[in-house]
Image (spheres, rainbow, N blue to C red):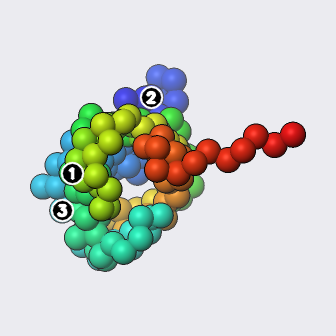
Amino acid sequence: MSDTGGIGKPLTPNKAIIQRFSDEIVNKGNFDALNEIVDENVRFETTVAGIGSGREGVKQVFGGLHKGFSQVACAISALVEDGDTVAERFTFTGTHTGEFRGLKPTNKSVRFNGMAFFQIANGKIVARWGVEDHLEMMRQLGLSPRPAAQD
């Protein structure tokens, strides 16, 4: 876990919520913690198509990751707060050992970056807008060609 509060500084309450979301939901797949961290009507937008709404949508996204990948780890490299909004930059790593979005396991490891903006109200995440580099993930799985070098 990175010291995203700044050197020697504790995390603000809103940053701590995002750190806990990353630790409990993303990294551990502890969906029992959803009720404490995420509003039931959360607006959760991601580059993963076809997810449901609310907490169930969040569970679909990260449940799918844990079904498809072992050694799941999301390392936060930056958290920036402005009012009720926290921006996050992260790196996801895992090994594709299970079916993921219809893709048979490749047993290949992936590492890709992403960014997200979270809105916090009453101590819970009420909205998330995220962009993850799924093209890079597909390339690392050998399922999408790398572009030709440009001269």
Which mark is first along the chain, 2 or 1?
Answer: 2
Q: How far apart are marks 3 and 1 (CA)?
A: 21 Å
The reply to whether residue 69 is visible in this rendering is no
Residue linked to disc 2:
3
Residue lying furthest left in this view?
A: 32
Give 117 or 120, whichever is nearer the viewer: 117
Residue at position x 36%, y 36% in the image: 108
Q: In which quarter of the image is the C terminus?
A: top right
Give 95 or 7, whichever is nearer the viewer: 95
Q: Where is residue 91 in the image (x, y as percent from the top left)?
A: 47, 39
Viewer-nearest of discs 1 and 2: 1
- SS class of the residue under badge 2? loop
Give 4 or 113, whichever is nearer the viewer: 113
Residue linked to disc 3:
35
Residue at position x 17%, y 55% in the image: 31
The amino acid type, in three-letter code, at marker 2 is Asp
Which mark is first along the chain, 1 or 3?
Answer: 3
The amino acid type, in three-letter code, at marker 1 is Lys
- Crowd around label 1: few <14 · some 14–19 · many ≥20 (10 Å): some
Residue 23 location, quadrant: top left
- SS class of the residue under badge 3? helix
Total numbered badges shown on the rendered structure = 3
**Please, is residue 48 above or below residue 86 in the view?**
below
Q: Distance between the residues labelled 1 and 2?
A: 29 Å
Give 13 or 134, whichever is nearer the viewer: 134
The amino acid type, in three-letter code, at marker 3 is Asn
